[in-house]
């Protein structure tokens, strides 16, 4: 969130953390930070691997469309349950596809029957993980469109895109931008249909991407990312920012810090600061107002309880994963 404070303070008009650089007066562009944290950092991770090793991955024959449909029809209740799990997890801000996949997989594992081979390519495990994974995106749109809070990195990027266009998601989004709201709902439906069609039609070709050597992929992706950054504002300085955030993202990945949390902090930082300062000014700078007012106190309590239960759930899932690895 400190990254979002770089630039001119919207309240006092004082430059903050610009280090005398005029290019930072407008703050750190969200898209520039996203490209550096996600694209460049991943390419730096890939570049550390041994290029001389055998990078060719065996591409097996793709399953037929009918076999995929039969597998889903045979496990229709698992599909429905995993979809509900993914949607509910997506509604909770700060979660993501990884948590939904673990919970759905754990639920499918608890309901396994004799003959199921979980951990060895069982189709039920694949259906549970991928169904809940995909359902998270739709659920994450609920807090985004109603509260302006992104539920995962994908919706965090969407918040940034909307803010660039002058549209601020929040409680009044549906009232002020009803047409855009309906358009988003329709596009979500159409995108799911398009993804199914595209996934089934190009699955053989997509699998061959895995055979492309990393010494080709890494420089191409870096060049495309740098070109895209420059095309946004025609500023060479932003290319340097992309490299800086790429290095930061690389170090975070190396030492186990979640990059997605950083993105959410950058996106929500300006919104949080503005409302925080407005609340303090309206209450004579009394910070205890956040625990003495019923609504804010209830929200803080709910946040603490959610963090507690999520931490316990994560520990259980880690134990489950360790037990599966030991069994193998």
Image: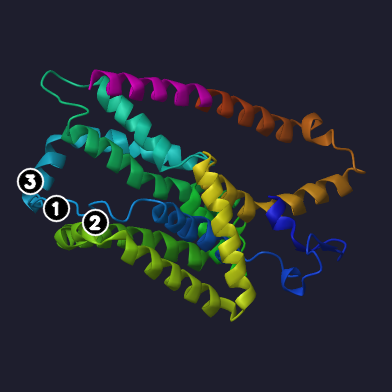
Crowd tier of the residue under label 2, counting other residues whose Cα lies within 10 Å: few below 14, some 14–19, many 20 or above? some
Earlier residue among tags 2 and 1: 1
Crowd tier of the residue under label 3, counting other residues whose Cα lies within 10 Å: few below 14, some 14–19, many 20 or above? few
**Relative to 71, 286 lies left or right:** right
**Relative to 223, 305 lies left or right:** right
Location of mark 3 (residue) = 67
Numbered tag placed on residue 210 in the rendering: 2
In the rendered image, residue 242, in percent from the top left (x then y), is placed at 57, 65
Label 1, label 3: how far apart the Cα atoms are: 18 Å
**At 77% across and 74% down in the image, what residue appears?**
22
In the rendered image, residue 34, in percent from the top left (x then y), is placed at 53, 60
Q: Nearer the viewer, mark 3 or mark 2?
A: 2
Location of mark 1 (residue) = 59
Q: Are marks 2 and 1 in contact (CB under 8 Å)?
A: yes
Name, please, the residue furthest toward the front: 52
**At 52% across and 25% down in the image, what residue appears?**
311
Nearer to me, 75 or 266: 266
Look at the image and give the residue range highlighted in magenta. Answer: 311-328
The answer to whether residue 194 is visible is yes
Name, please, the residue furthest toward the right: 284
Numbered tag placed on residue 280 in the rendering: none
Earlier residue among tags 1 and 3: 1
């Amino acid at each position: 969130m400190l990254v979002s404070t770089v630039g001119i303070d919207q309240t006092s008009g004082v430059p903050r953390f610009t280090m005398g650089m005029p290019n930072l007066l407008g703050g750190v562009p969200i898209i520039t930070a996203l490209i550096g944290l996600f694209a460049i950092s991943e390419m730096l991770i890939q570049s550390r691997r041994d290029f001389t090793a055998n990078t060719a991955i065996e591409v097996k024959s793709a399953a037929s469309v009918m076999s995929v449909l039969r597998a889903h029809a045979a496990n229709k209740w698992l599909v429905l349950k995993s979809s509900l799990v993914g949607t509910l997890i997506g509604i909770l801000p700060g979660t993501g596809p990884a948590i939904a996949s673990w919970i759905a997989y754990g639920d499918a594992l608890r309901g396994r029957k004799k003959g199921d081979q979980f951990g060895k390519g069982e189709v039920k495990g694949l259906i549970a993980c991928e169904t809940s994974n995909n359902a998270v995106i739709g659920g994450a749109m609920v807090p985004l469109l109603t509260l302006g809070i992104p539920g995962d990195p994908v919706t965090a990027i969407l918040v940034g895109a909307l803010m660039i266009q002058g549209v601020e998601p929040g409680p009044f989004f549906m009232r002020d931008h009803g047409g855009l709201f309906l358009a988003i709902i329709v596009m979500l439906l159409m995108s799911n249909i398009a993804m199914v069609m595209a996934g089934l039609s190009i699955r053989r070709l997509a699998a061959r991407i895995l055979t492309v050597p990393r010494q080709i992929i890494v420089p191409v992706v870096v060049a495309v990312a740098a070109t895209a950054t420059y095309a946004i504002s025609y500023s060479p300085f932003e290319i340097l920012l992309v490299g800086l955030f790429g290095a930061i993202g690389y170090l975070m990945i190396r030492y186990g810090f979640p990059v997605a949390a950083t993105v959410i902090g950058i996106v929500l930082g300006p919104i949080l600061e503005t409302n925080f300062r407005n609340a303090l000014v309206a209450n004579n700078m009394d910070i205890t107002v956040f625990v003495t007012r019923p609504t804010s106190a209830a929200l803080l309590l709910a946040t603490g309880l959610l963090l507690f239960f999520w931490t316990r759930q994560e520990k259980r899932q880690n134990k489950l994963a360790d037990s599966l690895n030991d069994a193998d």
